[in-house]
Image (tube, rainbow, N blue to C red):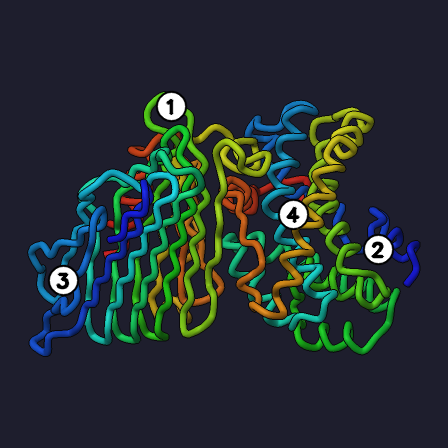
């Protein structure tokens, strides 16, 4: 970790590798400062990692980078101990949080962190980029909560890109909060909803047998993407009802 | 180039089938989210800065000569809703048919061969503009204008809104349309060096979700 004035640059890395005995080893599990990945109990072939927030942040001007690589035959489950709270900092300018996920052919990643909460006055640009091999499997959930209870949201831009075998199957950016392009809270985009989330599921068999599109209540839909992937897209009044919608789909997948 | 070619392409009476689509306005009216000129304006503004910017950048990139197959795949990745992907291809096919007769050229013929089921409409719009001798800026303006004129016109029919009010909404958005078109062209210019990932990917979650709900309605006035 480097701290320059009041800005923090921090990086965490996770590498998951098949251990040759039907399980998954974690030869690299590095974090610094606010990014602390911890191995928890393993379940069967899976290695489980929990991201523990050791400092608050990201704050204005901070730059966090998180890289996870899942090698052939490995299975990694990543969660987080608490929600990530974007806060205003003493430093001017936006904070950045970049997540890079690499999932090899024949590997599987479940990326299920807690919510990202955009607090009043914060300014965060978060990117999540997943690169998958042709036969890789992925479940990736991301949830954004605009403001703590009764609070105005900060400025938040979030871009999610998923590539399978070198082909982009999903590229979505959402920009909201004060200073975002007009209409973000209007009838076309969020319409007053304060929680918004996506869950991407990539499975090789979806290439020939994709799930049928269906509504999940009034404000969420499961859709097949143009590629071996499906997406749940949802808006909700709050974090709890958003999680309930996404969890229902997650449970149905097993 | 001729300036008037832009008017021909942008004319609401250009026979490309756009009048059958509401750009999500029908679902928003039914849900009570568009009720008057003010909420129509906010709807259009949200669509402009998301789907409008993406469409403008795709169209401008097509004029600049980016590979239509890559642009079409980029449009797919930016359109999670299969109902909206299908609508965009249907509109693209109709526009291509009209454009091939209006501005016959080998490039449009090749596009038709490459995409028998239709390419995404903004990609076709860009290549039609190119065939008509128009600029990336012209194509971006066309695309961003369509992103708001469709919902505005549809709302006149759906809500019996005063057409003067709907037109006033469009006029009030004009300075923002210019800015979005400029941003679209700037993004399109970076495609040559950085590839299609440089294109904007701004999305509107409610437009995507509601498009899926709308597609399942047994009776509707508009196709999307």
The Cα atoms of the two marked residues, 2 and 1, are separated by 46 Å
Residue B21 visible in image: no
Q: Secondary structure at mark 4?
A: helix
Q: Residues within 10 Å of mark 1 (few under 14, many from 20)?
A: few
Location of mark 3 (residue): A47
Res A119 quadrant in image: top left
Identify the residue under disc 1: A151
User: For mark 4, what is the residue?
Assistant: B52
Residue closest to the eye, A131 or B149: A131
Q: CA distance from mark 3 to mark 4?
A: 43 Å
Quarter-wise, where is residue A128 in the image?
A: bottom left
Q: Quadrant of the C terminus of chain A?
A: bottom left
Circle nearer the viewer, 2 or 3: 3
Q: Are marks 3 and 1 on the same chain?
A: yes
Residue B139 placement, left or right of A221: right
Viewer-closest of A222 and A169: A169
Residue A87 location (% of width, % of height): 34, 34
Same-chain check, marks 2 and 3: no
Residue ID for mark 2:
B9
């Amino acid at each position: 970790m480097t701290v320059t004035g009041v800005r923090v640059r921090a990086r965490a890395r996770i590498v998951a590798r098949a251990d040759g005995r039907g399980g998954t080893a974690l030869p690299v599990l590095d974090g610094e400062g606010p990014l602390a990945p911890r191995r928890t109990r393993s379940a069967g072939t899976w290695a489980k990692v929990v991201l523990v927030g050791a400092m608050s942040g990201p704050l204005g001007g901070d730059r966090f980078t998180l890289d996870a690589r899942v090698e052939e035959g490995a299975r990694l489950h990543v969660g987080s101990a608490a929600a990530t709270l974007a806060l205003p900092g003493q430093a001017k300018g936006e904070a950045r949080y970049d997540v890079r996920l690499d999932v090899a052919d024949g590997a599987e990643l479940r990326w299920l962190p807690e919510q990202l909460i955009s607090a009043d006055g914060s300014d965060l640009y978060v990117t999540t980029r997943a690169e998958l091999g042709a036969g890789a499997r992925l479940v990736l959930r991301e949830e954004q909560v605009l403001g703590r209870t009764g609070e105005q949201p900060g400025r938040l831009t979030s871009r999610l890109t998923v590539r399978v075998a070198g082909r982009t199957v999903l590229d979505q950016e959402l920009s909201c909060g004060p200073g975002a392009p007009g209409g973000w809270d209007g009838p076309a985009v969020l319409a007053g909803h304060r929680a918004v989330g996506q869950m991407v599921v990539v499975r090789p068999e979806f290439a020939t047998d994709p799930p049928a599109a269906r509504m999940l209540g009034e404000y969420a839909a499961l859709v097949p993407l143009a590629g071996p992937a499906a997406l749940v897209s949802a808006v909700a009044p709050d974090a709890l009802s958003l999680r309930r919608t996404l969890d229902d789909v997650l449970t149905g997948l097993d | 180039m001729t300036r008037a070619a832009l008017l021909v392409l942008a004319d609401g009476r250009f026979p490309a089938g756009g009048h059958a689509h509401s750009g999500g306005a029908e679902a928003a009216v039914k849900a009570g989210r568009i009720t008057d000129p003010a909420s129509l304006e906010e709807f259009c503004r949200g669509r402009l800065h998301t789907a409008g910017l993406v469409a403008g950048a795709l169209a401008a990139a097509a004029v600049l000569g980016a590979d239509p197959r890559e642009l079409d795949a980029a449009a797919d990745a930016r359109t999670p809703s299969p109902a909206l992907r299908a609508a965009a291809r249907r509109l693209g096919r109709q526009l291509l048919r009209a454009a091939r007769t209006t501005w016959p050229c080998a490039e449009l013929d090749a596009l038709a061969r490459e995409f028998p089921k239709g390419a995404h409409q903004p990609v076709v719009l860009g290549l039609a503009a190119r065939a008509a001798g128009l600029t990336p800026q012209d194509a971006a303006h066309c695309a961003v204008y369509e992103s708001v004129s469709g919902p505005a016109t549809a709302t006149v029919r759906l809500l019996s809104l005063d057409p003067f009010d709907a037109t006033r909404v469009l006029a009030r958005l004009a300075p923002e349309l210019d800015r979005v078109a400029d941003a679209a062209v700037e993004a399109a210019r970076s495609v040559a060096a950085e590839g299609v990932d440089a294109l904007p990917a701004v999305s509107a979650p409610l437009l995507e979700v509601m498009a899926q709900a709308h597609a399942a309605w047994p009776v509707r006035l508009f196709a999307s």
